[in-house]
Amino acid sequence: MSINEILGTIHDGTVQVCATADADYDHASQRISVTLEAFTRLASVTGDGEHLPQPWLPPGERVTEHLPHSEADEFVKDVFHS
């Protein structure tokens, strides 16, 4: 599962502030790993665009948890929104 959101814009709308969560689930160990990232990118670029890290944004983070696959989607959403 991946979540990508534009949280807002800065500099008169020319730069987007974005956050992502990318999750990988290992069925054998029933472990989920969620990688979180915050960055800016130029609003004029379509698609993914170049990620521009900013010192005022939270650093990237990885959260890992042991849980059944049926709870994975809800866990990713909770981690992302927290």
Image (tube, rainbow, N blue to C red):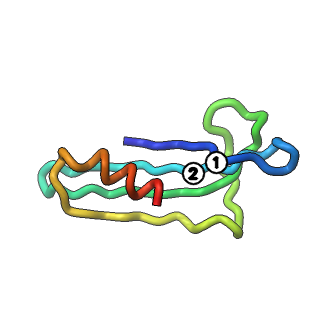
* Left or right, 25 with reference to 14: left
Name the image quarter holding residue 32: bottom left
* Left or right, 51 with reference to 30: right
Task: Give how far across and how far down residue 46 sits, in percent.
Answer: 69, 30
Q: Which quadrant is home to the N terminus?
A: top left
Q: Residue at x 70, y 54 (%)?
A: 52
The numbered mark, 2 or 1, whose residue comes first in the sequence reads: 1
Q: Would you name the residue on which mark 1 appears?
A: 7
* Left or right, 79 with reference to 37: left
User: Could you classify mark 2 by the number of other residues whose Cα lies within 10 Å: few (under 14), some (14-19), or many (20 or more)?
Assistant: many
Which residue extends farthest right? 12
What is the secondary structure assignment of the residue under circle 2? strand
Name the image quarter holding residue 35: bottom left
Q: Residue at x 47, y 65 (%)?
A: 61
Mark 2 to mark 1: distance in Å?
7 Å
Which residue extends farthest left? 28
- Residue 75 higher or lower than 44, as above or below: below
- Residue 66 higher or lower than 76, as above or below: below
Task: Give how far across and how far down residue 69 sits, in percent.
Answer: 18, 47
Q: Please identify, in this view, whether the residue under mark 2 or under mark 1 is nearer the observer.
A: 1
Discs 2, 1 touching: Cβ within 8 Å: yes
User: Could you classify mark 1 by the number of other residues whose Cα lies within 10 Å: few (under 14), some (14-19), or many (20 or more)?
Assistant: few
Q: Residue at x 15, y 52 (%)?
A: 68
Q: Would you name the residue on which mark 2 appears?
A: 19
- Residue 56 higher or lower than 18, as above or below: below
Which residue extends farthest top? 46
What type is the residue that disc 2 sits on? Ala
What type is the residue that disc 1 sits on? Leu
* Left or right, 31 with reference to 48: left
Q: Residue at x 61, y 37 (%)?
A: 48
